[in-house]
């Protein structure tokens, strides 16, 4: 099954009407390739098996259906007119757009690629605990105490815990575990309500048609603006000073300031700020409705500079062994197969 990582309706906002075929087309920009003018919104960001669950053949269609029904369809009722200056933006719009933007961030190929790194971090964390005598002893004592209310049949030993860790490492080493983890993440995030975003400040940036915004294949981008107008890309949605960007038309772009601590004055992003960020986050492509050598020259140096989980939304500053140990020690009855914190809010 082929799944859309960026909704077709959103891509169509950036399309032009081709006279010969009488169909909508996109100008596609890509690293070290000239602009291509016949990309179709129906297939430009559609990928086979993107939401496939190796354990449940029905899950892919279920996720697609839920994305459409719960997130795309409600927003599609007003997204065509959202860019009008007279649009009466209300609290219900920010509530619906919060879920839409959250899922749009997670459904991309860029976000899917982070699942491989998360599995590697989990294995490293499990091996770290296995080799740490003090952590093993504390976990044995903790999990033994957790078992008492249900009727302790035998004392949990260090060997029992090591065997459980080895089994979990084997499970996380299987070839399809990252894809299974990604599918679980999609389901989890469908139930997540980002209150900081929902209660934040919602703005719309505007530009004339001759200097359009582009939209990338990972269109939800974040940054923190530092002194001297330096942009630090790939900041978590709950980080201080974070700004969230989503182009919605060639002439309009959502600019969201989540309700977080702010220590820097907010500057109005320029078209160049937005377009460069779209290229930085992109896995392969950016799209818009015109061919422009100026746009191509702007994007080319920046394509693919940021990989989620590595240069952006990174957990590299945390110790995976300590993090997993703290999770296991804090959760009632937890086993050793819990997930390390997702990178979204890191």
Image (cartoon, grey):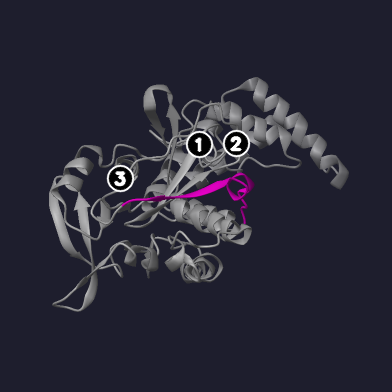
Looking at this view, is 164 or 323 the one in front?
Answer: 323
Q: Residue at x 34, y 64 (%)?
A: 13
Reading the chain from its start, which is encountered first: label 1 or label 2? 1
Q: Residue at x 64, y 30 (%)?
A: 325
Can residue 241 be seen in this snapshot? Answer: yes
Looking at this view, is 298 or 283 the one in front?
Answer: 298
Q: Identify the magenta region.
A: 191-207
Tag 2, which secondary structure?
loop
CA separation in Å, label 2 and label 3:
25 Å
Quadrant in the picture for the N terminus: bottom left
Residue 199 on the magenta span = yes
**Circle count:** 3
Tag 1, which secondary structure?
strand
Q: Whole-percent x and y of residue 128?
A: 54, 27
Q: Whole-percent x and y of residue 115?
A: 45, 46
Looking at this view, is 146 or 281 the one in front?
Answer: 281
Reading the chain from its start, which is encountered first: label 2 or label 3? 2
Which mark is drawn over residue 260? 2
Q: Whole-percent x and y of residue 103?
A: 50, 56
Residue 308 is left or right of residue 337, and the answer is left
For mark 3, does the 10 Å Cα neighbourhood hold few (<14), some (14 to 19), or many (20 or more) residues? Answer: many
Residue 345 on the magenta span = no
Reading the chain from its start, which is encountered first: label 3 or label 1? 1
Q: Which residue is mark 3?
A: 275
Which mark is drawn over residue 242? 1
Q: Whole-percent x and y of residue 271?
A: 32, 44
Tag 3, which secondary structure?
helix
């Amino acid at each position: 099954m082929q799944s859309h990582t960026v909704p077709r309706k959103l891509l169509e906002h950036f399309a032009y009407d081709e006279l010969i075929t009488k169909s909508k087309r996109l100008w596609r920009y890509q690293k070290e390739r000239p602009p291509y003018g016949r990309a179709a919104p129906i297939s430009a960001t559609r990928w086979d098996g993107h939401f496939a669950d190796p354990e449940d053949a029905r899950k892919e269609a279920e996720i697609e259906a839920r994305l459409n029904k719960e997130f795309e369809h409600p927003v599609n009722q007003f997204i065509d007119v959202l860019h009008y200056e007279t649009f009466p933006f209300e609290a219900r719009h920010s509530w619906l757009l919060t879920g839409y933007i959250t899922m749009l961030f997670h459904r991309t190929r860029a976000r899917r690629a982070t699942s491989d790194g998360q599995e590697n971090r989990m294995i490293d964390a499990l091996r770290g605990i296995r080799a740490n005598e003090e952590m093993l002893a504390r976990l044995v004592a903790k999990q033994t105490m957790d078992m008492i209310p249900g009727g302790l049949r035998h004392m949990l030993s260090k060997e029992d815990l090591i065997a459980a860790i080895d089994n979990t490492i084997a499970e996380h080493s299987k070839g399809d575990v990252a894809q299974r983890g990604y599918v679980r993440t999609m389901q989890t995030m469908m139930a997540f309500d980002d209150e900081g975003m929902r209660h934040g400040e919602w703005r719309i940036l505007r530009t004339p048609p001759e200097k359009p915004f582009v939209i990338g294949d990972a269109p939800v981008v974040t940054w923190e603006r530092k002194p001297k107008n330096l942009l630090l890309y790939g900041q978590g949605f709950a980080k201080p000073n974070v700004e969230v960007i989503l182009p919605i038309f060639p002439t309009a772009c959502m600019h969201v300031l989540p309700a977080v601590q702010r220590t820097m004055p907010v500057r109005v992003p320029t078209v160049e700020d937005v377009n460069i960020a779209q290229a930085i986050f992109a896995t392969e492509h950016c799209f818009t409705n015109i061919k422009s050598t100026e746009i191509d020259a702007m994007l080319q140096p920046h394509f693919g500079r940021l990989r989620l989980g590595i240069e952006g939304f990174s957990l590299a500053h945390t110790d995976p062994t300590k993090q997993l140990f703290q999770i296991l020690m804090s959760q009632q009855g937890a086993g050793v197969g819990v997930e390390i914190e997702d990178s979204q809010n890191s």
